[in-house]
Amino acid sequence: MTFAEKGADYPVKVSGVNMSPYPIERGKPATFDISATTGDQISKGKLVIDVNYFFLHVHHGVYDLCEETSCPVYVGDFVLSHQQTLPSFTPPGSYTLTMQMIGEDGKQLTCITFGFSIGFVPVADN
């Protein structure tokens, strides 16, 4: 995991990302738990998620922050939990996800980038 802008001093500090299952399976729900800390209370906002497959942009989503964590987000540690089911035709391989958290005033609170893999789904023998 890296911060999208190296050296940027974001108000929200992300400390880790946990993906389940890993590698992610096509056509099945995947959960991304993002651990973070904030020094300011956050009443509302949005998450902007973009996914690239190699250099090809394959997904863009905007989500209500309060649907991904409890609002208001109080000063201290919190966890965002985002669930996504990837289509069964999603190609296996390495992907890059960029997540921005935008506050209600439009100010960027954090921006991280991390890689993940989508595995091959085994074919059942008949």
Image: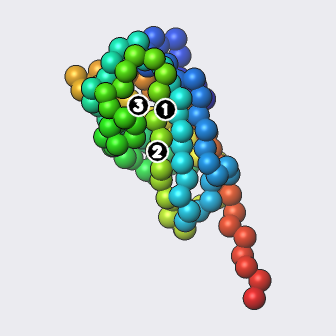
Disc 1 marks which residue? 79
Disc 3 marks which residue? 100
Residue at 59%, 28% (x, y): give it.
Answer: 16
Residue at 46%, 44% (x, y): give it.
Answer: 82
Q: Quadrant of residue 72?
A: top left
Q: CA distance from mark 3 to mark 1?
A: 15 Å
Q: Position of residue 59 (x, y in %)?
A: 43, 50
Secondary structure state at the residue bearing disc 1: strand
Disc 2 marks which residue? 82
How was this image coloured? rainbow
Under mark 1, the amino acid is Val
Badge 2 crowding class, 10 Å Cα cut-off, few under 14, some 14 to 19, many 20 or more, is: some
Q: Which circle marks residue 102 in the picture? A: none
Q: Residue furthest left?
A: 105
Q: Are marks 3 and 1 in contact (CB under 8 Å)?
A: no
Q: Is 99 in front, or is 64?
A: 64
Q: Is 64 in front, or is 111?
A: 64
Q: Tell me if 13 is positioned left or right of 106 in this view.
A: right
Disc on the earlier residue, 3 or 1: 1
Residue at 61%, 38% (x, y): give it.
Answer: 18
* Residue 112 seen: no
Q: Is 86 in front, or is 45?
A: 45
